[in-house]
Image (cartoon, helix red, strand yellow):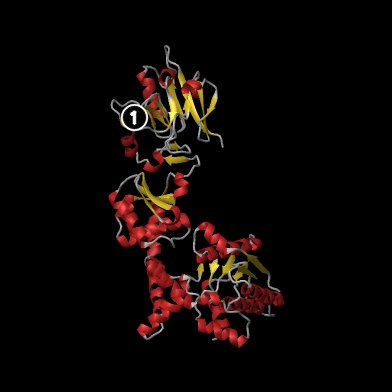
Amino acid sequence: MSLLLDCRKYCLDFGLLSCQAVIAGVSGGADSMCLLDILFSLSEESKKEGSADFFPKLAAVHINHGLRGEAADCDENLVRRYCQEREIPFFAKRIDINSIAREDKISLEQAGRDARYAFFDETAQKFRSEAGPVFIATAHHREDQAETILMNLFRGTGPDGMCGMQPIAGNIIRPLLFASKEDILNYMVTGKIPFLDDLSNFDNVYTRNRWRNQILPLIADVCHKDPVRPLLAFSDLAGTDKDFFDKAVAGIFEKNACRGGSGTYGLPLEVIRSEHRAIASRLIRFLYSNRFANATDLTAAHVSSILSLIIEDGNGRRVSLAHGKVAYLAEGMIFVDELSDLSDAKTHVWDVKGGQILLCSETDPPGPLAVFSDIAPKRVVAISKTSFEVDVILVENPEQVVYNGRTWYCPVKDLRGAVIRTRKQGDWFSRAGCAFGKPLRRFLTDRKIPAFIRGRMILVACESQVLWIPGVSCAAGFADEVSGSKYFESLGTEKNKLPVQDTELYRITIRDRN
């Protein structure tokens, strides 16, 4: 069969054209020009009278990386002319990859890839509607697949990395993944399709080029055969195993995953500990992919470190991962997230069972965030270094007693000398109704509050005695229905009946101004 017919069958088998539009990434080289010509030919065939084939809208995109001067301009002009002659919508963009790589402190390869896919997505937006998805087509072929498998092996991505690239992944399709480089070149020569060689493909300063031009030929020389075929055969076996494990892991995740403090999903430590390491490691990868869409930068070493953390059960501890990501333990669960989302200067809250911990913008800021002697009843005062504000209201009607994680009821006598601040060394906490207390550090550890947010927690204290931790607990007065009942009972009065004698009860509420 011809490459055109083989590609048509491949697209049908994997549903690569089940979309409303296909955006083809075209550099001007043999591979991408072959892809564009085949897609155009399939499009034209679908227009013939009597054809039952459907073909989505076709467009081409080209990135000029600004690395090869006139040669790069020639590539762009070639693709542009091809598209103009066939009335294919064409979109081009020029960028300075060198500057991007320097500014972002990444390799030229990574900068180029990021820029290409960003422009692909930008172009795809022009074609999106409710009619169906828009796919982005790339010209990866068999040899590219073999290179990717080897690179993944030595990158430490684990067994799943041995599966290589897939025919379809999200909105990315690879219609030529089955084809060899020889098949592509034969198609180009036979069809007299114009293309230009990119001389940078022979520059071994780039990592993939070294694999392509040096490592794979050396393996072929040692083994006396082309290494591509056995690598792809191994990839097929790995893919079969992956399909089985993926279904098992997805079921475990769906049954046990819970949302955590940062809004991301976490898995109970006991669930992971109870599974064989083959399942446990995949649960970690699944959790990571659920948060970041893929696990390409999660190495086997990362997974091993996370599993060790889970076995040790150091609550509040964390493991740093690639590109500013982190895995951490909290509330008997493992979570992964962006480190910046957990420790940057933005004020936010941290969800806990029953409420929300309030966080300020700095770790251990000097001085109090607010002083209660400055807060008169019915006056709203902002809490410095946060987006929160506090108001204090004298409770005159039992109907004013309502419960939520940011409201605290306290006798005015207990507010004398109290301030709103973050924790300090030597802080002590004794939960309301308990005869004994403990160091705040131990209390937070027992409540499984992550260590890396404790320095930003907003609390009310009088000297070293912590009176209230919003969203967690209180040492004086009451903050929920249970502690409220105990409070009224201690006064010898009925539930929800206001304190008698000279006791004034204040309602302190912290609200978000945003």
Q: Quadrant of the N terminus?
A: bottom right
Residue 331, position as x, y percentages in the image: 36, 44
Q: Residues within 10 Å of mark 1 (few under 14, many from 20)?
A: many
Quadrant of residue 415 within the rendered picture: top left
**Number of numbered discs overlaid on the protein picture:** 1
Residue 223, position as x, y percentages in the image: 35, 83
Residue lying at the far top of the rendered structure: 501
Quadrant of residue 289 within the rendered picture: bottom left
In this figure, which residue is indicated by the disc labeled 1?
429
Quadrant of residue 243 within the rendered picture: bottom left
Amino acid type, residue under disc 1 in the picture = Phe
- 463 and 244: which is toward the camera: 463
Residue 80, position as x, y percentages in the image: 68, 73
Residue lying at the far bottom of the rendered structure: 190
- 368 and 437: which is toward the camera: 368
Viewer can see residue 133? no
What residue is at 59 percent from the left and 86 percent from the top? Answer: 189
